[in-house]
Image: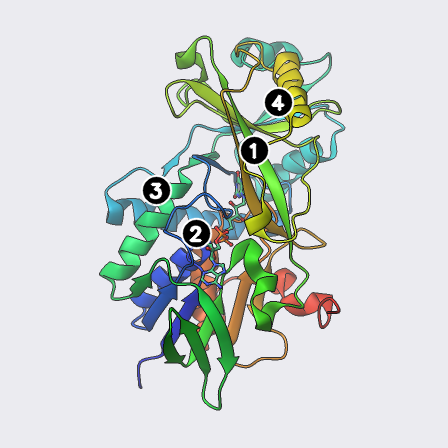
Amino acid sequence: MPTSRIAVVGTGIIGAMTAWRLALRGADVVAFDTHSPGHDRGASAGESRIFRTAYKEGSSYVPLLRRSQEIWRELERSAATRLLTLCGGLTIGSPDDPDVAAVRRCAEERGLEHEVLETAEASRRFPQHRLDDGEVMVLDPAAGVLRPEIAVQAALLAAETAGARVLPRSPVDAAGETSSGWRISSNGAVFDVDHVIFAPGPWARQLDPLRNLPVQPRMLTACWFPARDVAAHEPDSLPVAIRRHSEAGFSCFPALDGVSIKIIPHHLARPDVARPEDLPRTASTEFAHAASLAAQRLLPGVTPHPIRITTYAEGFTPDEHALLGALPGHDRATVMTGFSGHGFKLAPVLGEVGADLALGGTPAHDIAHLDPRRFGEGIDD
Ligand SMILES: Cc1cc2nc3c(=O)[nH]c(=O)nc-3n(C[C@H](O)[C@H](O)[C@H](O)COP(=O)(O)OP(=O)(O)OC[C@H]3O[C@@H](n4cnc5c(N)ncnc54)[C@H](O)[C@@H]3O)c2cc1C
């Protein structure tokens, strides 16, 4: 059988993982990115990402997460570096909170190891978080933190080692279907391939064949607060957390820089941006002030003034589940976008699914709920 020629457009974590899994299976892969791998303008940067197994988004994700973890470990061996630290994960809030309840339900349905810590016990074990009366913590010991920039680079190096051509600073400015596949243009050169994987993250609608997909770029903002006792806030002592709270919810990452913990506020707006290029490079004064109040209210061990604030773009779909499958209306094209704030941990298994689809196989995992056709023909022009 002739070798399949496959183009991957975009090498954030999704495209990087897919290029790697395709190259391992003998495909002739060429992977393009406008920027350099690990850059900070898209969705795959910012020092840390949460890995969770008890998944509030639905227990159907659990097998995908288990397979992802195996591949994260495979990539660590290939790169001889640590990418995933299983420091445990906390979901914190009222027992009636929908996310707290969903994590418990998922763990119970799937028989996952977990602990529910009532207020006094939770405050004793994790005093880094201040609890209101009656709040609980659900501890998922199989959760942890991933290192995004290193992971993207490790996946691309593994792809190159397996034979892929990786082309940074190579924007794809045109992609059109031909009688036998696709023609891709970048930096004045033309590439004819049998199949194309579109993995452009929040840039999806800027590519002509994807312009009708319902993927809205939004701005997410991360703030780093210095820890007074850094050791008590490092991964050995502090699990990664999702802190639910009506006035001040956030995701919270242990100190990885020897100085500060990171929070991503959930109770503040994640504004739409027309294009990722339009992303403001920092937050407004009002946002910084509100993030400080959240830290002051709920994180007693930090100085509540951010020392770093950075913005990132991510593509969101209307139901906040990704688009993964055949590009509607086109043969020989797979779309992988719209990961809506939770694609990083899943990228390894999604890369495997993308490789299955591009090579004409049936994916080993059930991804029916991610089918891009669930939104019909997409949005109107
Ligand atoms: C702040 C933040 C926090 C998050 N936290 C978590 C978390 O804790 N856990 C989790 O699992 N997920 C999390 N997510 C979500 C996760 O990080 C993303 O879903 C994931 O990184 C998406 O990767 P991607 O490859 O689709 O997009 P990107 O990383 O944005 O990659 C897309 C790439 O395509 C390239 N590109 C676009 N158009 C073209 C073109 N025409 N030609 C060539 N290249 C092109 C871009 O340059 C870019 O490099 C978070 C996201 C953000 C932004």
Residue beneath disc 2: 13
Question: What is the quadrant of the C terminus in the image?
Answer: bottom right
**Relative to 54, 212 lies left or right:** right
Q: Earlier in the sequence, mark 1 or mark 2?
A: 2
Vertical placement of residue 278 versus 330, above or below = above
**In whole angstroms, how far apart are the C-alphas of marks 4 and 3?**
30 Å
Marks 4 and 3 in Cβ contact (< 8 Å): no
Secondary element at tag 3: helix
Q: Earlier in the sequence, mark 1 or mark 3?
A: 3
Residue beneath disc 3: 150
Between 49 and 359, the residue placed more toward the observer is: 49
Amino acid at the residue labelled 3: Ile
Q: Position of residue 115 (x, y in %)?
A: 57, 25
Q: Residues within 10 Å of mark 3 (few under 14, many from 20)?
A: some
Marks 2 and 4 in Cβ contact (< 8 Å): no
Q: Earlier in the sequence, mark 4 or mark 3?
A: 4
Amino acid at the residue labelled 1: Thr
Secondary element at tag 1: loop
Residue beneath disc 1: 282
